[in-house]
Each structure stands twice: as C-alpha cells, then as structure tokens.
Image: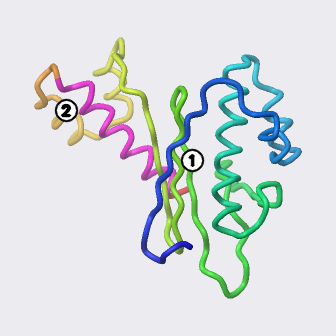
Amino acid sequence: MLQLGVTYLWTAWIGGRPLPATRSILSPEEAARAERFVFDRDRNRFVAGRGALRSLLAHYQGVEPREVVLEYSHYGKPFLPRELGRDQLEFNLSHSDDWALIGITLGRRLGVDLERLRVLDDLEGLARTVFSRRELAELAEVPEPERTEAFFNCWTRKEAFIKACG
C-alpha cells in the first residue's frame, strides 16, 4: 500500500461526460455542489475529478469510494478525519481544463497544482500582484520566449505550497 515518506502522484483525464456510476459515489454534498455549476463542462469536470479522488482514496483505505468520509477546513480544503493510532493519509487535488492531478502521501502536508501552459494577456501585471520582488527579478532575467513557462513554473510552486499549508 502506501509507504511512509513517499508521495504518489496520479493524473486523471476529466474531460467529457463522466460515467453515470461516478455520480453515485459522490457524497450528497458533492452531488449538490456539482448541480450548482452553470455549465455542463464544469459540472462534468468536477464530478470526474471527485470520482477519481474518491476512487484513489478508497483504494488506499480499503473501502468503497462512496464510504470515503471527507471533512473540510475553514478554507474549504478537504481532508480525511484522523483515526486514532494510524498515520494520517494526506491528499490534494488540482485540475486545469481536462486534466486533474492527485497527490497522496502519509504523515506530511501535501499540496499539488496543475496549470495549462497558455499565453496571458498581462503576464507581468499578474506577476506583480502575486510574486515577491525576488521572484519578479528572476522572471525579468528569463529570456522572453521562455518567460511564460517560467511564470507558470513559479505560479504552480506557490499554489502547491499554499495548498499544503491549508
């Protein structure tokens, strides 16, 4: 099963329409949240992503996906309730367009982030709102053809760190 100190990363394609059985493994709260999405595309991605997450967590816990119990921090980050005498299974989920990234580990905080590499209208302006002075200086040193990729590399690392902190 899981090995202490090892992080397991899984990718899942969440584009298209999820299988009907996927909806049946969601909690009532997740099903209600799915129905609040305006666009089918977003609803389908949410259902497929949560289905993949529940399936993986169920596998590692030795239960059925619908039996996975999730609680939420005051920031909305899902987590598994602690069980006395067992290492804490930690996980994190990120998605971008039709792909999801799920990280699972034992006994340590975990954050993952996934972003589709794309051209941004105002990359420098956005960077000024979220990057430190040092990060801005380093980004300015990157040759223009590589700057978008450098921006997203820094962005995803920051997001994963913040998610790990909760």
What residue sits right under mark 1 in the picture? 93
Residue type highlighted by circle 2: Leu
* Distance (Cα) linking label 1 and label 2: 27 Å
What residue sits right under mark 2 in the picture? 139
Q: Number of numbered discs present?
A: 2
* CB within 8 Å, label 1 to label 2: no
Residue 66 lies, with reference to residue 81, above or below; the image says above
Tell me the element at label 2.
helix
Crowd around label 1: few <14 · some 14–19 · many ≥20 (10 Å): many
Residue 77 lies, with reference to residue 30, above or below; the image says below
62 horizontally vs 119: left or right = right
Q: Where is residue 73 in the image (x, y as percent from the top left)?
A: 69, 56
Question: Residue 150 lies in magenta, yes or no?
Answer: yes
7 horizontally vs 142: left or right = right
Residue type highlighted by circle 1: Leu
Residue at x 56% of width, y 53% of height: 92
Q: Is the magenta stretch mostly helix, strand or loop?
A: helix
142 horizontally vs 55: left or right = left
Residue at x 48% of width, y 76% of height: 3
Q: Where is residue 56 in the image (x, y as percent from the top left)?
A: 63, 56
Give me the disc on residue 34: none
Q: Which segment is the magenta one?
A: 146-164
Crowd around label 2: few <14 · some 14–19 · many ≥20 (10 Å): many
* Colouring chosen for the image of the structure: rainbow
Residue 14, quarter of the rendered image: top right
40 horizontally vs 158: left or right = right
Residue 43, quarter of the rendered image: top right
